[in-house]
Amino acid sequence: MRVRELALGVAAALAATMATAQPIGMINGAYTAQATARMKAPLAGTDLFDAQAMRVVLCGTSAPFPDPLRAKSCTAVIVKGRAFIVDSGSGAVNTLQLMGFPMERISAVFLTHFHSDHIADLGEMKMQTWVAGRTARLTVYGPPGVEQVVAGFNAAYGLDDSYRNIHHGEALLPIDLAPMTAKSFPTPAGAVVVYRDADLTVTAFTVKHDPIRPAVGYRFDSGGRSVVISGDTAPTPSLVAASKGADVLVGEALSLRMMDDLHKAALAADNARMAKIFNDVETYHSDPVSVAKEANEAGVKLLVYTHLAPALPQPVLEKLFFEGVAEVRDPRTWLVGFDGLRIDLPYDGAAPATGKVAMLGRP
């Protein structure tokens, strides 16, 4: 079922064995061992899914710019064995599967808005969680418009659903569980609770992504710990209000300086079309220094940058991208997000801890 991750594992195994001219039996052994390891969904039995902490895993940290090591927007919040996904941009499901993420643990998806880089992998999220064995329809929460988005993906994947059901059988892939269910909430004037159970409360708040409306961010609260995910937004008081006292703010970042460089480069290349797009993009996002100031005002403990625009193909470019942030916020309290970044918020009140989730074939 997980063809892409299995193929990558097999390729790595073959490369390792062929390089030393091992006999066919050794090649077959490596193939089998690698495939077996991947089928166990390595993360399923780890502390990532225990009840000791609220956890965050970044599964997509790129804006629409192409980036070989970053999927588009995706953040996973894990609470006592269940995962909740915020946005599902292109490549997000691939990234999760390269981690060995147990897709059946995904309980719901929350969409911030309906730009393509936040919804493009929703069909794959639907299909892969179904194949992995979820036991209920996947619910997709969002502001008005989510019904249209979900209906579109359900329709686009309808034939695929029937093929898999016929091929693998109703007992394994019940056709009634294939479609997603949209759950819309009114665009909040301030903030509104959109999900609540015994362990988790999710609050949506309106952000400033004009002319894109509606657009929201989310705050997740569990056991005294809290995570805010900004979605796409220009600087706005609503983000500060929603982030008051939060343990973590996962905030988008666009380098105005680097985008201006791209604008000038497009003009120099007589590419007026891209020059206009680069100029337009600057108007509805937040530069890193502004986000740091908002985090300071809200009293956020840890700021994590995501949705990085433009792309950072070389680490040295981070110095340019985040110029000025260290002057307004303690460098120990912010970091640059990457696909696979893990943040743990222990329920005993200990400080946030960060780490890295290994991904097959990634450094």
Image (tube, grey):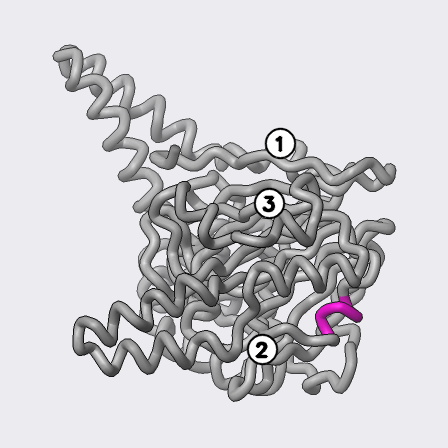
Instruction: Tell me if mark 2 has few (under 14), some (14-19) or many (20+) residues whose alpha carbon lies within 10 angstroms of its own.
Output: many
Check disc 2 and give the amino acid type.
Answer: Ala
Query: Left or right of 337: which side holds 264?
Result: left
Check disc 1 and give the amino acid type.
Answer: Thr
Q: How many marks?
A: 3
The residue at 47%/39% (across/down) is: 100
User: In the image, residue 253 lies at what x, y percent?
Assistant: 53, 61
Check disc 3 and give the amino acid type.
Answer: Leu
Label 1, secondary structure: give it. Answer: loop
Of the 4 image quadrants, the one containing the C terminus is top left
User: In the image, residue 134 lies at what x, y percent?
Assistant: 56, 55
Give the main secondary structure, helix, strand or loop, of the magenta stretch. helix
Whichever of labels 1 and 3 marks the residue nearer the N terminus, that label is 1
Callout 1–callout 3 Cβ contact below 8 Å? no
Q: What's the distance in space between the residues labelled 1 and 3, CA to CA?
A: 24 Å
In the picture of the structure, the residue carrying the numbered disc 2 is: 182
Q: Which callout, 1 or 3, points to the residue nearer the camera?
A: 3
In the image, the segment drawn in magenta is: 238-242
